[in-house]
Amino acid sequence: MKTGVETLILPAGAAGAEAAARRLAAGGLVAFPTETVYGLGADAANATAIAHLYAAKGRPAFNPLIAHVADLEAARRIGRFDARALALAEAFWPGPLTLVVPKTEDCPVADLATAGLDTVAIRIPAHPVAQAILRAFGGAVVAPSANISGHVSPTLAAHVESDLAGRIDLIVDGGPVTVGVESTIVGCLDAPMLLRPGGLSRERIEAVLGAPLARPPAEAESDDGQPLAPGMLASHYAPRAHVRLDAREIAPGEALLAFGPARLPGLDAASAVMNLSPTGDLDEAAANLFGYLRSLDAKGPRAIAVMPIPEDGLGEAINDRLRRAAVAR
């Protein structure tokens, strides 16, 4: 990927939204905040722009992208919603939920964005900056996380600048995001299936469906296979330092990503310590996860030790990201 693009940074607002829409319409790449993480946007109908997006991120071309739209009417122009998909859309959109549904016959989303699948992943973000940009643009925008592929996802405009300055056209700075982990992805094809845990808990989704979510086959999460949805590569969300999970003690030179009030043996020897939530609040932990991983990684520790985190609620999404970060590379 050749660098050297002049990356403009604008504050959120009407002028920023209009500038973003113009850049998108011209085939450019624009980073902007959603409530989950910062996304890197391209015109979903422009295959050339999407190819530039893959190149800017270093993203595997077989990993499908999420199409972001402003409202349900726009979503139904690109995807076919059965009764269960529609119930989830009406319950949780706008918000941190992505639905994978069959494409419409005249779906304008480029095949490159769907990785050749006959389905499309769709989300309506709740963030007012994302909404303003989508409405100003008027079409679907594919927007994976605005970072180098496999690196820790960005929750601040500064994170985007660190990874992608010189590779993209524009960053719209809307301040820190609120959710801090990517959207939950549910496949609505046969039985609704949890393809990726995220910012909306399994329990809330199942309450609307009145039935448990199915689980994807194990091979769907292999680095060798065709992923069913974004974020399903096994080695993903990875800092440069090795990540050691379920740490019960700290080795000299390790950094600690802590959770809760407990003090681990060896804490005084840690090279750095950040606590996702001293009180054990999983929502707070999710919002801090990627920013704290980046901060610890920037200190160059021999490894990042991570304390155990419960699997309930948003803990499922947090642990999913941490397991992917810990995959050997």
Image (cartoon, rainbow, N blue to C red):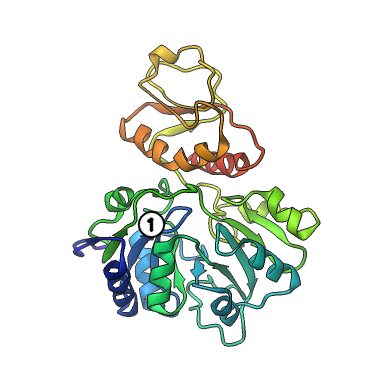
The residue that disc 1 covers is 146
Q: Give the residue displayed 75% in from the left and 72% down from the top.
A: 83
Q: Nearer the viewer, residue 66 or 237?
A: 66
Q: Residue 89: give x, y in percent of width and height.
A: 64, 67
The image quadrant that residue 76 belongs to is bottom right
Q: Considering only vertical position in the picture, is 266 above or below 294? A: above
- Which amino acid does the dot numbered 1 rest on? Ala
Q: Residue 129: give x, y in percent of width and height.
A: 39, 63
Quick check: 132 left or right of 23? right
Q: Nearer the viewer, residue 259 or 59?
A: 259
Label 1 sits on a secondary structure element that is: loop
Q: Considering only vertical position in the picture, is 228 above or below 282? A: below
Q: Residue 251: give x, y in percent of width and height.
A: 45, 17
Residue 327 seen by the camera: no
**Residue farthest to the bottom, as pictured:** 106
Quick check: 99 left or right of 305? right
